[in-house]
Image (cartoon, grey):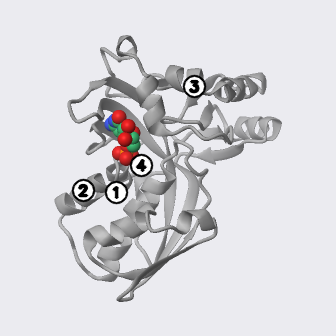
Amino acid sequence: MRGRAYAKINLTLEVTGKRPDGYHELVSIMQTVSLFDELSLTPSDDLSLQCDVSELAGDDNLVLRAARVLGRGGHFELRKGIPIAGGMGGGSSDAALALRLLDAAYDLRLPAGELLAAAASLGSDVPFFLCGGTALVEGRGERVTPLSPLPLRWLVVLNPGVPLPTPAVFHELRPPEYATAPSREFRRLVNTLEAPAERLEPAIGRCKQRLREAGAKEVLLSGSGPTVFALCSSEQEAEHVAAATRGRSARFVSRDEAIQTFH
Ligand code: C5P
């Protein structure tokens, strides 16, 4: 069995405060987009992972952790297409797809609540990827509400190619920067983590500038970064901006497309 694990962008990401458990409370509208990893599963008693990016094939890969959470074996093959550690949820999307592949391959028919709990135990972004499309994500990331699909948009993704660990960005965020009136519908691009991420990594500001110089109007950091994206008004504009910046163009991916059935 094989499937595609799509990337996400955060159209909004508003952090409203810090929780006693050290995580942050957030309100985010997430959208799956057309960059994807491919993951296949051959059921087996033992557990293994082969990946075209060999550094990612270690024991701590979220695909292997997903299999351990469900107590099942298998041979996984992962082909990466999503920028690694970029703020586009690649590892989290792989983990959610691994859960769905295992559920299907072993005919587990796990109740939605159990899959969601398994996903949340693997990482804050994983529950969203069980849903895909356009969704409102709240709490630490475990409360996911599907939203009506937004009109199809094209975008350009630019990855500065520098490491920027998520905990460091949350740590750099100051309480006066917390969002006080987060929006649960999409009005405009906003990301509370953009300012702290830019303070830590000036390459982010330079990437945003490159996108603007190529004509992009709506530019934002995705998640905790360092990937930035530009929402474009047409496919042609996206192709132009991608060529000028050497970024990658992509489009919104609907829930039906993101959560396909496997063969
Ligand atoms: O859940 P995950 O392992 O993806 O989170 C990585 C790190 O990001 C956490 O250790 C924490 O520092 C930060 N984080 C947070 N609040 C969230 C999600 C992530 O502080 N809601």
Observer-side mark, 2 or 3, equals 3
4 and 1 marks in contact (CB < 8 Å): no
Who comes first in sequence, dot 3 or dot 1?
1
The quadrant of the rendered image in which ligand 1 is seen is top left
Ligand 1 contact, mark 3 (Cβ < 8 Å): no
Which residue position holds label 4? 133
Q: Element type at marker 4?
A: loop
Q: Do the residues labelled 1 and 2 touch (CB within 8 Å)?
A: yes
Q: Where is residue 59 in the image (x, y as percent from the top left)?
A: 45, 68
In the shown orientation, is residue 168 left or right of residue 181?
right
Disc 2 from disc 4: Cα separation: 16 Å
Judged left or right of residue 55, residue 150 is left
Question: Which mark sits nearer the N-terminus, 3 or 4?
Answer: 4
Q: What residue type is labelled 3?
A: Leu
From the image, state whether disc 1 or disc 2 is nearer to you.
2
Q: How crowded is mark 2: few (under 14 residues within 10 Å), some or many (20 or more)?
A: many
Q: Earlier in the sequence, mark 2 or mark 3?
A: 2
Closer to the camera in the image, 195 or 108: 195
Q: Please identify, in this view, whether the residue under mark 2 or under mark 4 is nearer the observer.
A: 2
Give the residue at mark 2: 116
Of pointers 1 and 2, the one earlier in the residue sequence: 2
Residue of label 1? 130
Neighbour tally class for label 3: few under 14, some 14-19, many 20 plus, Cα within 10 Å: few
Above or below: residue 213 compared with residue 51: above
Judged by depth in the image, the label closer to the viewer, 3 or 1, is: 3
Q: Which amino acid does label 1 sit on?
A: Leu
Q: Which residue is at a point 62% across and 28% down the rendered structure image? A: 201
Q: For residue 203, which quarter of the picture?
A: top right
Are circles 3 and 4 on residues that touch, CB within 8 Å? Answer: no
Q: Quadrant of residue 119?
A: bottom left
Q: Can residue 260 be seen in this view?
A: no
